[in-house]
Image (spheres, rainbow, N blue to C red):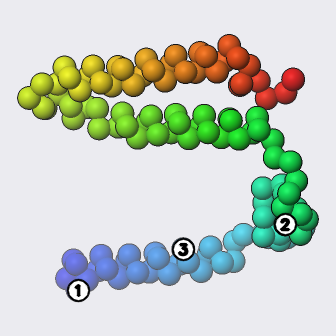
Amino acid sequence: MTPILSILVVALLISVILAIVSFWLPYMVPDHEKLSPYECGFDPLGTARLPFSLRFFLVAILFLLFDLEIALLLPLPWGNQLPSPETTFVWAAAILVLLTLGLIYEWMQGGLEWAE
């Protein structure tokens, strides 16, 4: 048998064994919460006009903002290969300073306090 064929046979054998074990191994005990289509805590059969927590919404927006910041700063290590890497680092520092000032403002206003 050639080495490539033997590697393919071993890979296929391991894949089949893992697929079979993954169906037999888990011990499932379904309960009411796991069987419901919504796991977020909202009643899917109730009215859609229930009051929504504004504090929860603000924390979610804050999380998305800082998640976006990570996505914006991810290509920063490749900025030193540009003709003027100082410009890239100045813009990155400006983004970080702006977000830090916004976080400090939000903290001082009490927007990060989950419970009163």
Whether residue 74 is visible, yes or no, is: yes
Q: Earlier in the sequence, mark 1 or mark 3?
A: 1
Residue 24: give x, y in percent of width and height.
69, 77
Residue at 64% over, 21% down: 106
Q: Which label number is shown at residue 25?
A: none
Whether residue 31 is visible, yes or no, is: no
Q: Which of 53 and 38 is in front in this view?
A: 53
Amino acid at dot 3: Leu
Amino acid at dot 1: Met
Amino acid at dot 2: Pro
Residue corresponding to mark 2:
44
Q: Do the residues labelled 1 and 3 touch (CB within 8 Å)?
A: no
Residue at the bottom extreme of this rendering: 1
Spatial separation of the CA atoms under disc 1 and disc 3:
24 Å
Residue corresponding to mark 3:
18
Residue at 13% over, 32% down: 81
Residue 22: give x, y in percent of width and height.
62, 73
Residue corresponding to mark 1:
1
